[in-house]
Image (tube, rainbow, N blue to C red):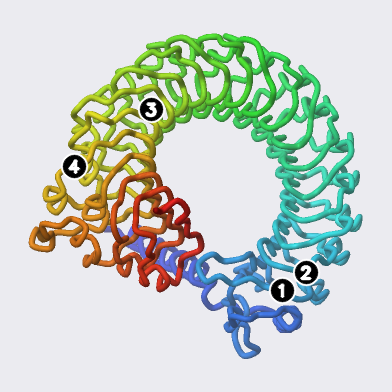
């Protein structure tokens, strides 16, 4: 190597080493940065105004560098405090009360302030917050603020996010000055007790991506037309806000919209607007409880990116579920409950292989069988078919739904086959409701259900459940995680307690079944609700000592001898006890 080349190489290595040192120094500086004395003092004054019952701000001490304090972040270069986040923590249940000190004005570079999910006792939002001129994000949700929103907040010209949700602004109008916050991208005013018309000044917020006005009272007025001019909107939530009248066609201009929620308003029996089908970026469409009627417009079939389609509690006038829904191949959630659909369920729904939730409850499928193809929707976690006028046997193909958490077949004219073996394959099931189904031939029902080890809620009332050999019950355990069990009005006898209580040793069963259930000597039971009314239990009721978590116990309309075991009085968690009708 020549001398010039060697010299160049050495210079290059030195430069590289210096650059690396500078880089590493910048990366590590956040651990060593010292906040300014004046800002540390301001934070300590702020702390003095708070009631800190759990000592969650123990790290806030005068001798400590405040950039390391809980909820504080500083600029790595200057040491100025830029973030103050004392939103409620679900991890340590810390919730602050008290006063908000104006010492925060000594944090001139603060750009993020989050005091959400605390309890400030109904105080008005402090006016001085409007002087924190560098703020970009202000989050005060669910912090028990009330009264008018101070107009001083209109000075926050750099604000990108304003969240005042879940406070009580006493039925006042949304402040007009919010429309002057021209940099806003996210505006959340949900459930804040605003009323009156939505101020047209909000139409100036041309950078807005998210607008949430849900759960307020806009007094039956129409959705403002100017919302259609907010062309950058990606999320629009106007649910449960007392809007009425037709949906303004100007909303067709919201071509970037990903989420549209118009649920729980009163659209006066109008059809779902066809133009919604042109909002091609939509992923979530919620029109539930909105008093739409008429046919579902076929234009919704153009929404190829849709993940969620919620149409419950509208009136689709007894029409069939539209076939085009089966071609919305990205759907994960389809809710069509209580929507006055009838006729057969279209087989095209078999194409919805990404579906996690399917709810067809409370419609009229005219006594047809539950479609077998539902068993091929392998991603389903929630299947609700209650009170939908299905009949015939439950298709065993439902046993293929190994990811299912919830199965609700309540209130159909379904007659089960003798074999419920398909149920035992639903290994992820946590909730099962088959009440009012005719299970009179299902002699293996305890055995099938006992394999559902994750089951937490089981409802089998008025199912004509057949009695089972009491000795065989000793070898079959009920789910060890059950919290709710309803076997009401099935004419079962006392031997069912052997299954409920997970008796395991046949020697515990005497020849006299009545004696065998007097003491349920098993591992402590997880049940919180036990409903056994309207059966045929004779003799004394059993000892409930092991049911220490019971909150609700229903034993009425049985044939006991009138005596209540002392153990019931020892159930310290019991809130409801019904024994009426025990003979």
Q: Residue furthest bottom?
A: 63
Q: Secondary structure at mark 2?
A: loop
| Mark found first going from the N terminus, 4 or 1 | 1
Q: Where does residue 522 sit, x and y in percent of width and height?
A: 22, 65
| Mark found first going from the N terminus, 2 or 3 | 2
Q: Is residue 174 left or right of residue 531?
A: right
Label 3 vs label 4, nearer the camera:
4
Q: What is the CA distance from the residue labelled 3 to the residue labelled 4? A: 40 Å
Label 4 vs label 1, nearer the camera:
4
Mark 1, residues whose alpha carbon is within 10 Å: few (<14), some, or many (≥20)? some
Q: Where does residue 404 sit, x and y in percent of width and height?
A: 33, 37
Q: Where does residue 157 sit, x and y in percent of width and height?
A: 83, 51
Label 2 close to label 1 by CB (< 8 Å):
yes
Is 168 in front, or is 565? 565
| Mark found first going from the N terminus, 4 or 2 | 2
Say which residue label 4 marks: 468
Q: Residue at position x 28%, y 57% from top? A: 539
Label 4 close to label 1 by CB (< 8 Å):
no
Label 4 vs label 2, nearer the camera:
4
Say which residue label 3 marks: 354
Q: Residue furthest left?
A: 507
Mark 4, residues whose alpha carbon is within 10 Å: few (<14), some, or many (≥20)? some
Say which residue label 2 marks: 121
Q: What is the CA distance from the residue labelled 2 to the residue labelled 1? A: 7 Å
Label 2 close to label 3 by CB (< 8 Å):
no
| Mark found first going from the N terminus, 2 or 1 | 1
């Amino acid at each position: 190597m020549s001398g010039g080349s060697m010299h160049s190489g050495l210079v290059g290595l030195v430069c590289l080493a210096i650059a690396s040192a500078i880089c590493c120094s910048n990366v590590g500086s956040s651990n060593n940065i010292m906040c300014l004395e004046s800002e540390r003092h301001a934070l300590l004054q702020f702390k003095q105004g708070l009631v800190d019952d759990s000592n969650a701000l123990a790290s806030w001490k005068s001798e400590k560098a405040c950039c390391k304090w809980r909820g504080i972040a500083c600029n790595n270069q200057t040491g100025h405090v830029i973030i103050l986040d004392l939103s409620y923590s679900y991890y340590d249940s810390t919730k602050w009360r008290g006063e908000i000190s104006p010492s925060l004005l000594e944090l001139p570079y603060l750009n993020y302030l989050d005091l959400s999910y605390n309890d400030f006792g109904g105080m008005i939002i402090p006016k001085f917050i409007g002087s924190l001129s560098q703020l970009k994000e202000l989050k005060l949700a669910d912090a028990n603020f009330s009264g008018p929103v101070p107009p001083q907040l209109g000075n926050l010209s750099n604000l990108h996010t304003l969240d005042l949700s879940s406070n009580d602004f006493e039925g006042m109008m949304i402040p007009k000055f919010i429309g002057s916050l021209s940099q806003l991208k996210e505006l959340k005013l949900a459930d804040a007790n605003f009323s009156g018309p939505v101020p047209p000044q909000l139409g100036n917020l041309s950078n807005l991506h998210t607008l949430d006005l849900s759960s307020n009272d806009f007094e039956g007025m129409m959705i403002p037309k100017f919302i259609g001019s907010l062309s950058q909107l990606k999320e629009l939530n106007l649910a449960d806000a007392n809007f009425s009248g037709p949906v303004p066609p100007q909303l067709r201009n919201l071509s970037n919209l990903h989420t549209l929620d118009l649920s729980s308003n009163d659209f006066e029996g109008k059809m779902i607007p066809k133009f919604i089908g042109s909002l091609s970026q939509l992923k979530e469409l919620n029109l539930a409880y909105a008093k739409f009627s008429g046919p579902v417009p076929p234009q919704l079939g153009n929404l190829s990116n849709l993940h969620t389609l919620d149409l419950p509690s509208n009136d689709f006038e007894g029409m069939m579920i539209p076939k085009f829904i089966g071609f919305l191949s990205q759907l994960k959630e389809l809710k069509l409950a209580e929507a006055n659909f009838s006729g057969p369920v279209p087989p095209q729904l078999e194409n919805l292989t990404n579906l996690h939730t399917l709810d067809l409850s409370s419609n009229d499928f005219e006594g047809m069988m539950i479609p077998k193809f539902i068993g091929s929707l392998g991603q389903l976690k929630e299947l609700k078919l209650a009170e939908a006028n299905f009949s015939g046997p439950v298709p065993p193909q439902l046993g293929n739904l190994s990811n299912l958490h919830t199965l609700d077949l309540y209130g159909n004219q379904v007659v089960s086959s003798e074999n419920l073996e398909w149920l035992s394959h639903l290994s992820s099931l946590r909730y099962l409701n088959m009440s009012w189904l005719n299970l009179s031939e299902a002699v293996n029902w305890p055995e099938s259900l006992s394999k559902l080890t994750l089951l937490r809620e089981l409802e089998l009332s008025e199912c004509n459940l057949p009695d089972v050999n009491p000795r065989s019950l000793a070898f079959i355990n009920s789910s060890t995680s059950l919290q709710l069990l309803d076997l009401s009005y099935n004419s079962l006898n006392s031997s069912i307690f052997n299954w409920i209580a997970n008796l395991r040793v046949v020697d515990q069963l005497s020849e006299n079944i009545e004696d065998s259930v007097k003491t349920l000597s098993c591992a402590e039971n997880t049940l919180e609700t036990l409903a056994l009314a309207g059966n045929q239990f004779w003799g004394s009721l059993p000892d409930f000592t092991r049911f220490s978590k019971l909150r609700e116990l229903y034993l009425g309309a049985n044939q006991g001898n009138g005596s209540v075991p002392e153990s019931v009085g020892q159930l310290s968690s019991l809130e409801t006890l019904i024994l009426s009708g025990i003979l």
